[in-house]
Image (tube, rainbow, N blue to C red):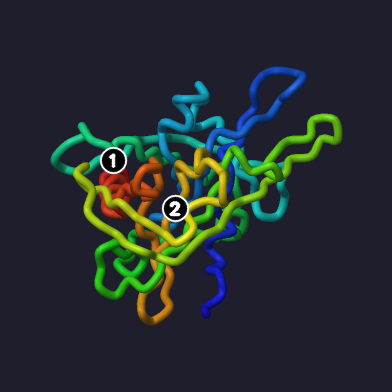
Amino acid sequence: MRSTPKILSSTKPVLYETGYADWPYAFAGSCFPIRWGRKLYIVSAYHCYENHQVKPEDTLYPLPEDDWRFLGFCSKTRGKDRESLDSKHHDQIVIEVCANLHPARELESVEAIDVSKPNGTISLDDPSLKDVWLRGYMFANPEHKIDYEEGKISQQAYVTNGVVSSRRSLFEHCHMLKVKTPCPKACSPKGMSGSPVYGEDSDGNVKYAGTVIEFNSHTDEYLIIDFSILVETLRSANA
């Protein structure tokens, strides 16, 4: 059995400031970093922000060297392809990290896959796909909390793998993905939205496959936006 991919550690909760003195911080789902060439982005699901009335650019994504220093952002864009914006994949949100606010060494310290390269992505219906990995921050996890009295933030993630099935969704550019243990027993998967899905090919290479946006409790499947939406969105932004 191969070890858990290192890239999983880069998935973080969507942490934000509430503006209230008694509970200054809260969580709103999951997010992860992606590169396009020399540029760094943070990716999530837009409804995570919409449901909590948070601006995407207010995401507190910590630097690897210091959990109390955060990335600064300069722009944001929603997921799109060349044909249409009227679909589930419009839930993808991409926030550009402002390179002028961080020295190159800080940005390079963030573990992220470069999706501008063909070998950085894989489709969930690719015949070479052997496994998938998901890591996110479920709201129901009792160890995933903020201790305001002690001034501590506990970021307990849930990690799962073991692909059972993957099929095309009725929504364009989306897949339905089932894994062996989609969430802990008697636990709601809410909070996994915005998590990346990484696919492992037959050679053990781990690549970006898509982003979680929903969970179907009747079929135990995650609804995943295909990697192609993120690629097309970043390609357009960098044209």
- Identify which residue is drawn at 31% across, 43% down: 237
Query: Is 204 located above or below residue 36 in the figure?
Result: below
In this view of the protein, which residue sits in the foreground, 53 or 70? 53
Q: CA distance from mark 2 to mark 1?
A: 14 Å
Label 1 secondary element: helix
In the displayed structure image, the side of residue 118 where residue 18 appears, left or right? right
Q: Which residue corresponds to the image point at 79% horizontal and 30% vertical from the top-left?
A: 148
Q: Is residue 151 above or below residue 155?
A: above
On the image, the x and y values in percent for residue 45 come to 42, 38
Q: Which residue is mark 1?
A: 89
Q: Is residue 113 left or right of residue 100?
A: left
Residue furthest out toward the right? 150
- Residue at the (56%, 58%) spot, across then down: 159
Q: Is residue 74 visible?
A: yes
Q: Quadrant of residue 114?
A: bottom left
Q: Nearer the viewer, residue 135 or 221?
A: 221
Q: Position of residue 17 (x, y in %)?
A: 64, 27
SS at mark 2 in the image: strand
Kindly indicate the quadrant of the structure image that contains residue 197.
bottom left
198 left or right, relative to 3: left
- Residue hosting label 2: 196
Q: Position of residue 34 (x, y in %)?
A: 45, 53
| Above or below, comparing residue 43 to residue 2 in the picture | above
* Residue type, label 1: His
Q: In which quadrant of the rendered view does residue 84 lie?
A: top left
Q: Nearer the viewer, residue 233 or 127?
A: 127
Q: Residues within 10 Å of mark 1 (few under 14, many from 20)?
A: many
N-terminal-most mark, 2 or 1: 1
In the rendered structure, find residue 137 and report the number of the disc placed on it. Answer: none
What amino acid does circle 2 point to?
Answer: Pro
